[in-house]
Image: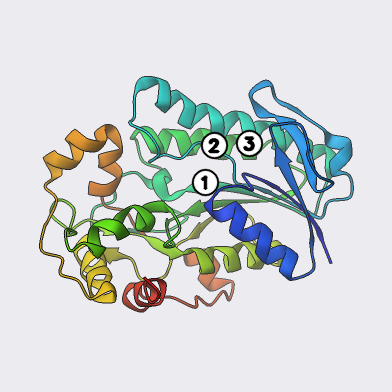
């Protein structure tokens, strides 16, 4: 049994991970910003870069998932600052604590936004970063994770998480259930996705493996947005007849629309080479399974 500390434990990935790790018999400590309310909580204040390091003594792994949701609000200049600062300050705070604590592994979230716009070109961990807003965020986010140089550090470049309870799929399901879903923009853009189920399995694999540095956590078969939306409609037994024009997305979502209309064809080369086997490598069976109870 391991002792594992998690930031961002109330988010989509974090809450699922906490439950799964506890079910497997691990002791989980959740870092919280408010005063602690139970024995499994540890207080921290990433804005002021303070943390109760003593309460984390003896942890075997630290998993950093903290950060404001990129699709939660319109990208005003203030919210763009929050997207950046919430990631960099929290990662810097926990990384400094990790360097002091010396656990076996530090796993810190990043995102495939690192690569920027890739078009039809497939990219792996060996490719350079992009030059748009989220690529810049990811660069600073990953740099902050490097502040624990004496600990094996994994920077997970996470793809589009698929789960009916949240994220992109959670937002799309109501539209498709009512038969008013369809491709976004041209539909030719690549989406590099992963089920929440496989993301949790990948984190556990990374804890036990000897991988370090950047690791893409994306299913081995990216899908175009047209393929994705057609598969979702089939899974729900609904039509996908109403494409959403790019200009309408830009009006509705502002800057975040670039993430839905942009193309990222990302391959999980390191994870696959290390022996990780995805339970859901193809998007159609994944969406069929995820929408079976909808």
Query: Mark 2 to mark 3: distance in Å?
Result: 7 Å
Query: Residue 14 versus residue 53: which sits nearer the camera?
Result: 14
Q: If you read the primary sequence from the N terminus, does the residue marked by circle 3 or circle 1 appear first? A: 3
Image x and y of residue 52, in percent: 82, 33
The residue singled out by tag 2 in the image is: 141
Label 1 near label 3: C-beta < 8 Å?
A: no
The residue singled out by tag 1 in the image is: 110
Image x and y of residue 108, in percent: 62, 47
Query: Residue 77 versus residue 240: which sits nearer the camera?
Result: 240
Q: Residues within 10 Å of mark 3 (few under 14, many from 20)?
A: many
Image x and y of residue 203, in percent: 62, 61
- Residue drawn at the location 49% of the way across and 52% of the way down: 157
Q: If you read the primary sequence from the N terminus, does the residue marked by circle 2 or circle 3 appear first? A: 3
Task: In the rendered view, tell whether residue 38 sits above or below residue 228.
Answer: above
The residue singled out by tag 3 in the image is: 91
Label 2 near label 1: C-beta < 8 Å?
A: yes
Label 3 near label 2: C-beta < 8 Å?
A: yes
């Amino acid at each position: 049994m391991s002792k594992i500390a998690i930031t961002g434990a109330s988010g989509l990935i974090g809450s699922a991970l906490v439950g799964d790790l506890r079910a497997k018999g691990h002791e989980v400590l959740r870092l919280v910003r408010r005063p602690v309310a139970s024995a499994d909580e540890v207080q921290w204040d990433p804005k002021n870069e303070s943390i109760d390091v003593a309460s984390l003594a003896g942890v075997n792994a630290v998993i950093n998932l903290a950060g404001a949701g990129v699709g939660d609000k319109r990208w005003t200049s203030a919210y763009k600052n929050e997207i950046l600062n919430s990631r960099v300050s929290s990662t810097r705070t926990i990384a400094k604590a990790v360097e002091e604590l010396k656990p076996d592994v530090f796993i810190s979230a990043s995102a495939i936004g690192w690569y920027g716009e890739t078009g039809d070109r497939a990219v792996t961990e060996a490719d350079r970063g992009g030059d748009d807003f989220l690529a810049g965020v990811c660069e600073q986010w990953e740099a902050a994770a490097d502040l624990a140089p004496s600990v094996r550090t994994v920077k997970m470049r996470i793809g589009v998480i698929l789960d009916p309870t949240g994220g992109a799929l959670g937002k799309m399901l109501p539209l498709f259930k009512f038969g008013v879903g369809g491709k976004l923009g041209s539909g030719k853009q690549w989406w590099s996705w992963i089920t929440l189920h496989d993301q949790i399995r990948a984190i556990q694999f990374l804890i036990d493996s000897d991988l370090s540095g950047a690791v893409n956590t994306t299913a081995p078969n990216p899908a175009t947005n047209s393929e994705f939306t057609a598969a979702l409609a089939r899974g729900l037994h609904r039509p996908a007849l109403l494409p959403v024009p790019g200009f309408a997305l830009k009006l509705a979502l502002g800057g975040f629309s670039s993430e839905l209309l942009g193309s990222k064809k990302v391959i999980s080369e390191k994870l696959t080479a290390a022996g990780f086997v995805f339970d859901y490598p193809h998007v159609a069976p994944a969406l069929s399974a995820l929408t079976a109870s909808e």
